[in-house]
């Protein structure tokens, strides 16, 4: 299956790409198709193969099997292997990797050596303007802030007009406040130039907020690739649900064609199934109200400014978290009624995987808007 968002010629395509280091399979059967101008984030736990994937695309690693195509040209397959400098790929690293002995303009011009001097100067000026650093052209890297250095690194990567820009944890050396701003700046530049980019991150917020598609990796494989909303709201597995944010899992059972968990009936109408099922609930999908005969007891309450996070125990011993606006605050030991928040259609897992195929919304969804059906539809 090629995960293409549309039928336009992809800027980048990986087909059945494998790469092992001895017994470690760092990339197993990777399939990915990235359309021109698309911004894709790659996320997964340490050691899952994110860097290997970037290195394979950049040409710093050779696949053991499979094919990589960049801008319609084969970069690597069984017979061919293009060196990094011939791949039309731009790289931006976490540590900026600027040449300390070259000025900002010199750093950017470095990748333009094949371009005639007159056009080179014009191109340097152009990309400097793009990243709003024209006034710093003659400075040296040590005279720049971290955010400015990262914008120079981006300008340097963009200068040769690459088919794809690869960004390897580019914001992780920046402090929290600067990070969000530089991330916004970088995204704006990539969007305004229609650049195709792949960004590796270990930060969930970054993965969800930057770009069009999130690719979640695990053990050298792509576990799920989809729009940020899809990956967060409709995780393909227990692993993705847990990795992309906080989640609780409640067992679910059928009765009378309805699916029930301890917080009540789930929206939708379901064909019966004997398998062990679980409902994925994120804290914002559970609401609490004061009720001395309620189904839950508060274990703890954590004030988080605009929100309060409650942890509650249910009669069965299972527990769930609830994140609500801060006026809803309950003390430990208090009895409350816990429900699935209005308008939520939680994902249902079977054997740790999003249930699909046999469990389909065959009858009208009862309690949820019709587009909420997607969370229980086969992918
Ligand atoms: P990530 O970037 O997600 O942390 P990597 O792609 O760096 O993961 O690594 C994937 C797996 O391959 C890990 O188990 C790592 O130890 C292994 N690995 C990566 N590069 C090498 C190498 N040059 N030699 C041996 N093993 C490697």
Image: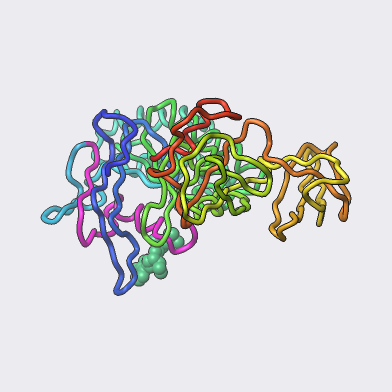
Give the vertical position of 354 relative to 116 (above or below): below
Above/below status of 349 relative to 112: below
Quadrant where the N terminus sits is top left
Work out whether residue 96 or residue 110 is closer to the camera in this orientation and state it: 96
In depth, the one of 219 and 160 nearer the eye is 219
Query: Where does ligand 1 appear, by image quarter?
Result: bottom left
What percent of the width, then of the height, locates residue 346? 57, 41
At which x and y percent is residue 218? 43, 58
Asked if the stretch drawn in magenta spans residue 311, the answer is no
Q: Is residue 265 above or below residue 57?
A: above
Residue 175 vs residue 361, the one in the foreground? 361
Q: Which residue does the image show at 63% across and 42% down from the upper left?
A: 178
- Residue drawn at the location 52% of the way across and 25% of the way down: 370
Q: Nearer the viewer, residue 342 or 131?
A: 342
Q: Is residue 245 left or right of residue 64?
A: right
> Which residue is at a point 74% across and 54% down the rendered structure image?
314
Q: Which residues are magenta?
A: 44-71
Furthest residue toward front? 256
Q: Is residue 357 left or right of residue 147?
A: left
* Residue 215 placement (x, y as % from top left): 42, 46
Query: What is the residue that sits farthest to the left in this orientation?
Result: 79
């Amino acid at each position: 299956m090629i995960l293409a968002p549309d039928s336009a010629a992809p800027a980048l395509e990986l087909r059945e790409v494998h790469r092992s280091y001895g017994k470690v399979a760092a990339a197993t059967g990777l399939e990915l198709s990235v359309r021109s101008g698309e911004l894709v984030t790659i996320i997964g736990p340490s050691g899952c193969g994110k860097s290997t994937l970037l290195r394979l695309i950049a040409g710093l690693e050779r696949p053991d099997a499979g094919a990589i195509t960049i801008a319609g040209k084969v970069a690597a397959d069984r017979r061919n292997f293009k060196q990094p400098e011939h791949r039309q790929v731009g790289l931006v690293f976490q540590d900026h990797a600027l040449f300390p002995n070259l000025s900002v303009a010199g750093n950017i011009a470095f990748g333009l050596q094949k371009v005639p001097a007159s056009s080179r100067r014009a191109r340097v000026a152009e990309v400097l303007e793009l990243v709003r650093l024209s006034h710093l052209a003659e400075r040296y890297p040590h005279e720049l802030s971290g955010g400015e250095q990262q914008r120079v690194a981006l300008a340097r990567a963009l200068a040769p007009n690459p088919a794809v820009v690869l960004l390897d944890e580019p914001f992780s050396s920046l402090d929290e406040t600067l990070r969000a701003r530089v991330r916004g700046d970088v995204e704006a530049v990539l969007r305004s130039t229609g650049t195709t980019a792949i960004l590796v991150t270990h930060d969930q917020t970054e993965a969800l907020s930057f770009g069009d598609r999130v690719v979640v990796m695990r053990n050298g494989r792509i576990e799920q690739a989809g729009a940020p909303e899809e990956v967060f709201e409709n995780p393909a597995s227990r692993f993705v649900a847990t990795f992309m944010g906080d989640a609780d899992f409640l067992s679910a059972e059928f009765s009378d064609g309805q699916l029930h968990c301890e917080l009540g009936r789930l929206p939708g109408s379901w064909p019966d199934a004997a398998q062990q099922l679980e409902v994925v609930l994120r804290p914002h999908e559970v609401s609490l109200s004061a009720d001395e005969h309620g189904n839950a007891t508060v274990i703890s309450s954590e004030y988080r400014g605009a929100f309060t996070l409650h942890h509650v125990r249910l009669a069965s011993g299972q527990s769930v978290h609830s994140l609500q606006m801060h006026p809803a605050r309950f003390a430990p030991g208090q009895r409350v009624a816990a429900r699935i928040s209005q308008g939520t259609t939680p994902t249902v897992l079977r054997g740790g995987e999003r249930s699909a195929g046999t469990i389909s919304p065959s009858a009208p969804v009862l309690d949820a808007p019709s587009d909420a059906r997607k969370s229980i539809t086969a992918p």
